[in-house]
Amino acid sequence: MLSKAEVVARYLPETLQVKPSAEAFAPSNIALCKYWGKRDNALNLPVNSSLSISLGHLGTHTRLALSDSGEDKVLLNGKEQALDSPFAAKAIAFWDLFRRDQILPIEINTTNNIPTAAGLASSASGFAALTKAINEFANLNLPIDVLSAFARMGSGSACRSLFDGFVEWEMGQLEDGMDSHGIALEASWPDLRVGLVKVETGEKAVDSRSGMKRTVETAHLYQSWPMQAAMDIQKLRQAIADKDIDALGMTAEHNAMSMHATMIASWPPLLYWQPASVAVMQNVWGLREQGVSVYLTMDAGPNIKLLFEADQEAAIKAVFNDMEVVAPFAS
Ligand code: DP6
């Protein structure tokens, strides 16, 4: 098995020539067909292809500069982070793949504009923005497919955040994973909306990385997952081509529920839902019974994302009044 460092090194010049500073932005993304399970834990190579929608201007802005102090420095939303904090350690470990043994102390300044109230994870947009910023900072001029594959090595779902709109992450087949990256779909859907419904939780969840590992290792139900994901990708492609919100929403909701079923069937069981998550689901299903076209999806956490079209927004907001609404294709 190859290591990340070995794979990245093939694309680097012998000596990095860095600029004084560089910056980049990457959007957050929500999977409509989820990535759940790895065939290679070191390179984050997935068992199945996945498909997402990027959240436009919501995401991560990252600025890199050579550190004046000669020491690495990491800031998150304006606050300096301890270098041994999980966030700083991951970001620095990623930069280490590029600087190798060169003395290049860095200041990584990351700002997320994802509303904290939305309870959205930001590792996808974070690694995508960091990868883009490194490409600029170190004058690498690498093609976007390569950058997407690099971002994947930081966090799988980050490979989809290199692109706007609908993005398919092809699982690929190569041992080095360089064919496992995002591809933007040629599609626009101006009326599409994503609603972010935050569910309060005091519980600390199991992160996606350990959650998917546990599922792959212990859930017999997981065996049916790759087949379901492959079918769902086909259906989503068609729904996107037809701009059919019911087909898109139904497929995304069914896919998310199937992923959660594999989590629940793990040992020890993984249940990311809170009682309030279930209450939101029931409200969504209640709205559908009243003829409102609204569907839900959930990741490895208690929060719910809704999928609908602009003309349904008022009816949905009447039930979820503090929902944050994103228009992924707004110009
Ligand atoms: C449920 O990309 O966070 O959100 O590759 O281990 O960093 P790592 O996992 P991550 O997993 C995301 C899982 C998901 C589904 C998805 O976004 O496709």
Image: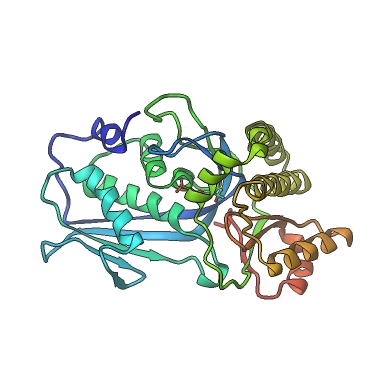
Q: Residue at x 65, y 75 (%)?
A: 322
- In front of the other: 153 or 133: 153
| Quarter location, residue 194 | bottom right
Horizontal and vertical percent for residue 120?
53, 62
Q: Is residue 222 left or right of residue 169?
A: right
Q: Residue furthest right?
A: 290
Q: Residue at x 70, y 45 (%)?
A: 258
- In front of the other: 10 or 43: 43
| Quarter location, residue 89 | bottom left
Q: Is residue 313 visible?
A: no
- Establish if 290 lies above or below 103: below
Q: Is residue 79 visible?
A: yes
Q: How many marks?
A: 0
Q: Where, quadrant-wise, is the C terminus in this rendering?
A: bottom right
- Establish if 77 lies above or below 292: below
- Establish if 82 lies above or below 14: below
Q: Is residue 68 left or right of residue 127?
A: left
| Quarter location, residue 299 | bottom right
